[in-house]
């Protein structure tokens, strides 16, 4: 079998199923990551600080809200292209995919629910990286259960007063604007566009974390925060409106975790092709070859999975259960591949000369990020049995 694909990891030649524009987007992101990220990301992770100078370059590549209309700063790319972009960004580091994914999530919320004034005020600035956005739903005690959120709002004197906090929020310490969800009377839910500098709004950075180290992760805090009426984004009594907006983030994780797996596999393959032990290259040993085959098999399954899911999304036929399955399956797959890769590298696998341990640590966050493995299991379980095991 002749494989003309660009990657050693593309065993089923998925590349041949992609459009020319999709390949161009993927390859441009890959080249940008190699030229601008690969040589600095280990130090950034060790320093636990996001390299902010990358924001402009990623914006110029269409990394923020690329699927939105050109009028609002997007490029009108399809979801296959967006997924490939997430794959290449997370190959570099999870902090890059988080930056793009969260920014796009904020933009998609404003585009979906916002009025024309709100769209024109925020979307182009978010697309250009002039503004950095955060998405506030998870709370210190209610990550997987937004029904029980404690962040609340009340109307007063023509404005809204918001109290509470959101935890584990990407870009919280550096955000200029945040889309924040809160609960009101009679289980009303409201989304607000919150700007830094608003009375009663502050942020904090989560210190001493072992995962997502190069990503700015933190807390959004609201103490009698005053939100003008024009910053109300959406009011609803349907929790489904919130869940629907999470789909783009979970889709990004499904593709991004595949990117981590591909990177770990290719690092291990290259290492095995060069490393000598007992007088022979270790790629000649049966156990090493089995590990490489196991990794490639897992990756190939996941490539087919997200390729099909992207087609469904582009046809507006994907369900949130299908997105949950892809997120759950691909993160689990990537965890397995990364650990096999680390074993092939031996002692070198734990050093900063290779990206494996950084990716393993990031994957530990992805297991619970954008919905835990257990929650996605129950979402799928409800779909196939018709019975909710949650409530």
Image (tube, rainbow, N blue to C red):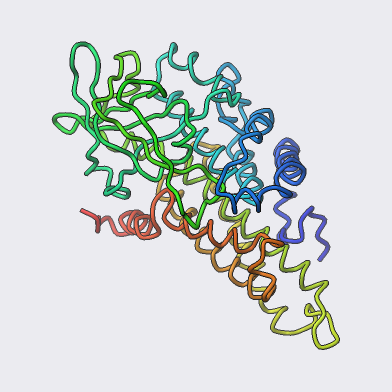
Would you say residue 156 is visible in this rendering?
yes
Residue positioned 71% across, 60% down in the render: 12
Whole-percent x, y for residue 88 in the image: 66, 47
- The answer to which quarter of the image holds residue 289 is bottom right
Residue positioned 41% across, 55% down in the render: 368
Q: In the image, is 92 to the left or to the right of 184? A: right
Residue positioned 80% across, 84% down in the render: 277
User: In the rendered image, which quarter contains the N terminus?
Assistant: bottom right
Q: In the image, is 89 to the left or to the right of 30? A: left
Q: Is residue 228 above or below residue 297?
A: above
Would you say residue 292 is visible in this rendering?
no
Q: Residue furthest left?
A: 186
Whole-percent x, y for residue 151 in the image: 25, 35
- The answer to which quarter of the image holds residue 25 is top right
Q: Residue furthest right?
A: 279
Q: Is residue 128 above or below residue 316?
A: above
Q: Work out whether residue 267 or residue 27 is closer to the camera in this orientation and state it.
A: 267
Q: In the image, is 348 to the left or to the right of 207? A: right
Q: Is residue 363 above or below residue 100?
A: below
Whole-percent x, y for residue 191 in the image: 32, 27
Q: In the image, is 331 to the left or to the right of 114? A: right
Q: Work out whether residue 153 or residue 375 is closer to the camera in this orientation and state it.
A: 153
Whole-percent x, y for residue 77 in the image: 62, 31
Residue positioned 62% across, 48% down in the render: 44
């Amino acid at each position: 079998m002749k494989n003309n694909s660009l990657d050693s990891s593309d065993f089923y030649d998925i590349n041949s199923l992609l459009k020319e524009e999709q390949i161009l987007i993927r390859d441009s992101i890959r080249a940008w990551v190699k030229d601008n990220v690969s040589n600095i990301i280990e130090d950034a992770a060790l320093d636990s600080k996001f390299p902010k100078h990358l924001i402009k370059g990623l914006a110029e590549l269409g990394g923020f809200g690329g699927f939105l209309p050109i009028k609002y700063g997007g490029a009108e790319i399809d979801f296959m292209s967006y997924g490939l972009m997430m794959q290449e960004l997370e190959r570099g580091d999870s902090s890059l995919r988080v930056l793009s994914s969260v920014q796009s999530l904020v933009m998609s919320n404003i585009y979906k629910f916002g009025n024309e004034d709100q769209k024109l005020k925020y979307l182009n600035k978010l697309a250009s990286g002039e503004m950095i956005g955060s998405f506030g739903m998870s709370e210190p005690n209610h990550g997987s259960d937004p029904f029980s959120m404690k962040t609340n709002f009340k109307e007063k004197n023509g404005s809204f007063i918001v109290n509470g906090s959101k935890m584990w929020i990407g870009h919280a310490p550096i955000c200029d604007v945040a889309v924040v969800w809160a609960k009101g009377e009679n289980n009303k839910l409201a989304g607000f566009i919150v700007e830094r500098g608003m009375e009663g709004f502050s942020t904090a950075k989560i210190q001493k974390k072992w995962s997502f180290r190069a990503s700015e992760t933190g807390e959004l805090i609201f103490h009698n925060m005053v939100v003008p009426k024009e910053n109300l984004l959406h009011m609803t009594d349907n929790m489904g409106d919130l869940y629907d907006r999470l789909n783009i983030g979970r889709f990004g994780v499904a593709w991004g975790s595949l990117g981590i797996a591909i990177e770990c596999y290719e690092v291990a393959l290259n290492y095995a092709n060069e490393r000598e032990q007992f007088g022979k290259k270790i790629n000649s040993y049966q156990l090493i070859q089995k590990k490489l085959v196991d990794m490639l098999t897992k990756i190939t399954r996941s490539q087919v999975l997200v390729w099909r899911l992207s087609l469904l999304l582009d046809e507006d036929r994907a369900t949130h259960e299908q997105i949950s399955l892809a997120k759950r399956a691909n993160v689990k797959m990537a965890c397995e591949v990364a650990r096999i890769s680390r074993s092939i590298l031996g002692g070198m696998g734990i050093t900063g000369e290779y990206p494996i341990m950084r990716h393993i640590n990031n994957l530990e966050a992805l297991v619970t990020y954008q919905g835990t493995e257990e929650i996605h299991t129950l979402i799928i379980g409800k779909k196939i049995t018709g019975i909710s095991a949650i409530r």
